Image (cartoon, grey):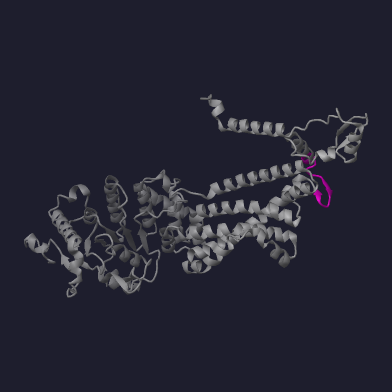
Amino acid sequence: MGSKSTQHPFFISIFFLGIFLFAWHVATISTPFDPTGKTDEELMVMEFNGDIVQTDDGRYVWNPEKEKVKGVPGPMTVLEKAWIELNEAFVIKGTNDHGIAFLVGYTVSRFSVGFMAASAVAILVGIILGLNQILFRALNPFIQILKPISPLAWMPLLLYTVKDPKWTSILVVFMAAVWPTLATTAFGVNSLRKEYLQVAAILQLSWFKRLYKVILPGAAPTIVNGLRISFGSALVAVVPAEMLLGELGVGYLSWIEWNNLDIAGVIFAILVVGTVGVVLDSGFNKLAGLVTYRE
Amino acid sequence: MSFLSIDHMSKYFPSHSGNGTVCIFEDVTVKINKGEFVTVIGHSGCGKSTLLNIIAGLETPTEGGAILNGQEVTGPGLDRMVVFQNFALMPWMTVFENVSLAVRSAYPTWSSQEIKAHVQKYITLVGLQGAETKKPTALSGGMKQRVGLARAFSIEPKVLLLDEPFAQIDALTRGVIQEELVQMWNATRNTVFMVTHDVDEAILLSDRIMLMTNGPSARIAEIVDVTIPRPRSRETIIEDEHYYKIRNHIIHFLVRHASHGQAEESGDHTDRSGPVKINFRDQATKPVGAVLCGRP
């Protein structure tokens, strides 16, 4: 039995993080180059091969350029890289070398536009299908076929038709986000207690009032669940879309660092993707909390 | 000309086997006067709620129809408000918002002050002052139905339709709310059409009680006049000489129809003379047994 403070999940989290970072650090320690027991000829061959370089004071050390791709970089290397990137967060160095803040901004806005457009379409169509059982049963086979298709599978076709990588990446997010919300909205509206609609009918509420006073709030908890699934799948889709299309963003960052053979950069990009996801998700949960109710 | 009349109304549903139809009830004809409180009693599944829904305009009859104030009922409207068995309050709205949604719809020309005062009046009437900002989840069953009643009375409908309004409320609270309903009804004298299977509730509240046979092909077999003078209260009503006569009569009817109602119906297609009218004041001199055998 531990004391109260160690049972707090926060401390346990810190504890596991510490273990992980330590293990990572130990596993990636690289020993400095030791020339003992090597002949001058051997050293010359190694220098020729680019394994080692001679410093100004005549000592031999591992070639720092080669070191970058030898094994996985340790946590300190990644931290160093992160420090550099974060210091240059708002710097634009070239057409394709924008600071990390810009990249996050591009990804978030690309994600937001695609997700919101998909949500609007999905909720609207979902409500129509939810209120009309015959239409729902007529269209359901198509939804079932389209739903499991990976949004990335649409990319070549989208790229070919819209001929613009910017819009293609947004449409990929759209395709990822549209189906879960559509299906759950239709379900939520359809399983709305019929008494609510009967009350709305007796009170002679207008079509619009019926929609935003009764149907939308009534189905809101289910719709939010659908949005949450869509949200996750759109977030998953936006990174590879950026990679494949070469659109500036955090997914692009991860790919460009790979092309630079900067593994520390790749790990940093992964962490940025995770952070962006957490921040967006918590914002979404706050929003979701406003519209849900208990029966 | 009666205020609300149900005219030769029948309702058929498609049968579960897929071919043909099942008759829920047939040839129901009832005339209800303005300001009258009429109750339908029958076993579960006899179609009494369907009958109420048709009057509300939420369902359509297969044959016949309902006429309110000289106009045929073709759909739901603000002149017929339903109080639902499961309350049907919007759980995302507060008590106040639930009632004001109705008031706003019924009186679209009112200012927000007028609406607020009107809503407050009815919330106070059902004793829920102080609970205006609560959500229905935070209320007990009895309080929920008080909101339901406030919502229904607040739009001052021509006909109030009560669909087993107290079935989901515990017995002790039920009695209290029934009495509150009596008081509200005394104040407003709405025409009320109620559906229930609580005999005591029906006797306490109603002017006339219609007894429905079991479905399928249910009919209104008898109409009992509740010959107990108003004002009534739960305490004094049981001392009335007609109370147990009426109560026993209804319970006998229900028991008879629970055991072999269906068999009786299947061979009983000659009886189309309309419901038997039972009035214990008219028949006060006759032996009770004769009345009980009014429908062999």
| Percent coordinates x, y for residue B267 in the rendering | 18, 72
Callout count: 0
Q: Is residue B59 visible?
A: yes
| Percent coordinates x, y for residue B166 in the rendering | 30, 52
The image quarter containing residue B152 is bottom left
Q: Is residue B282 left or right of residue A207?
A: left
Query: Toward the viewer: A240 or B4?
Result: A240
Q: Is residue B111 visible?
A: no
* Residue in the picture at 8% in, 61% down: B289
Task: Specify the segment rendered in magenta.
Answer: A85-97
Above/below status of B93 relative to A189? above
Query: Toward the viewer: A159 or A91?
Result: A159
The image quarter containing residue A80 is top right
* Residue in the picture at 75% in, 55% down: A247
| Percent coordinates x, y for residue A113 in the rendering | 67, 56
Q: Is residue B88 magenta?
A: no
| Percent coordinates x, y for residue B258 in the rendering | 20, 60
Query: Toward the viewer: A114 or B294?
Result: A114
